[in-house]
């Protein structure tokens, strides 16, 4: 039940979470995202899951993705933003991530705030999309794209 809140949100919010891009199969997309990790420090990292959103609001699909190494619980979260690859954080939990639009952000935040066992919140301000993922077994972090700084910033998260 460590990841119950994210699993519930995936089920409830799936249509709003940036469904996978049309035209590519999931495996093709994961292989393409893995190939983008050219830095030697990411040798042995493989894209395991992804979600799609327009983080920088340029009208093009951006991919947030989780990687794993030969250990199924160690890896990192990244976002492909055009030709840039941005590392969000390393994780040592089963990689789960969720892209949310403004409505999904509100629903998830309401669920977190109303819970007696989950603590945290998401302060997304005027962001249209965020991506959330577990960095530890019981700790999730959410990031949003800051247009003025042209980078991702932490906008909240939760522990359970």
Image (cartoon, rainbow, N blue to C red):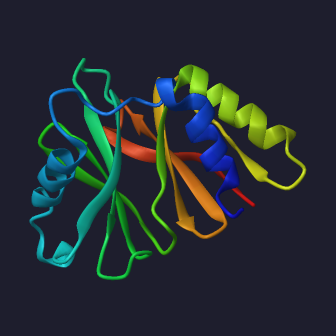
**Is 130 placed left or right of 30 in the picture?**
right
* Residue 15 seen from this side: yes
Point 35% across, 53% down: residue = 49
- Look at the picture and state if 132 lies above or below 52: below
Q: Position of residue 109 (x, y in %)?
A: 70, 35
**Is 96 placed left or right of 80 in the picture?**
right
- The quadrant in which the N terminus is found is bottom right
- Look at the picture and state if 158 lies above or below 129: below
**Is 153 placed left or right of 53 in the picture?**
right
* Residue 127 seen from this side: no
Q: Position of residue 106 (x, y in %)?
A: 66, 26
- Look at the picture and state if 40 lies above or below 117: below
- The quadrant in which the C terminus is found is bottom right
Point 76% across, 42% down: residue = 112
Q: Residue furthest right?
A: 116
**Image quadrant in which you'd find residue 68:** bottom left
**Image quadrant in which you'd find residue 3:** bottom right
Point 81% across, 40% down: residue = 113
Q: Residue furthest bottom?
A: 71
């Amino acid at each position: 039940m460590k990841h119950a809140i994210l699993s519930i949100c995936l089920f409830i919010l799936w249509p709003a979470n940036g469904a996978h891009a049309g035209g590519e199969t999931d495996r093709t997309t994961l292989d393409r995202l893995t190939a983008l990790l050219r830095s030697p420090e990411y040798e042995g990292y493989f894209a395991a899951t992804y979600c799609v959103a327009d983080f920088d609001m340029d009208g093009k699909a951006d991919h947030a993705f989780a990687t794993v190494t030969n250990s199924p619980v160690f890896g990192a979260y990244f976002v492909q933003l055009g030709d840039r690859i941005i590392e969000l954080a390393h994780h040592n939990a089963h990689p789960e991530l969720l892209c949310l639009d403004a409505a999904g952000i509100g629903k998830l935040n309401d669920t977190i705030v109303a819970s007696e066992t989950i603590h945290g919140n998401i302060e997304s301000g005027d962001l249209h999309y965020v991506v959330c993922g577990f960095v530890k077994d019981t700790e999730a972090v959410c990031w949003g794209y800051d247009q003025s700084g042209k980078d991702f910033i932490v906008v909240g998260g939760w522990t359970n």
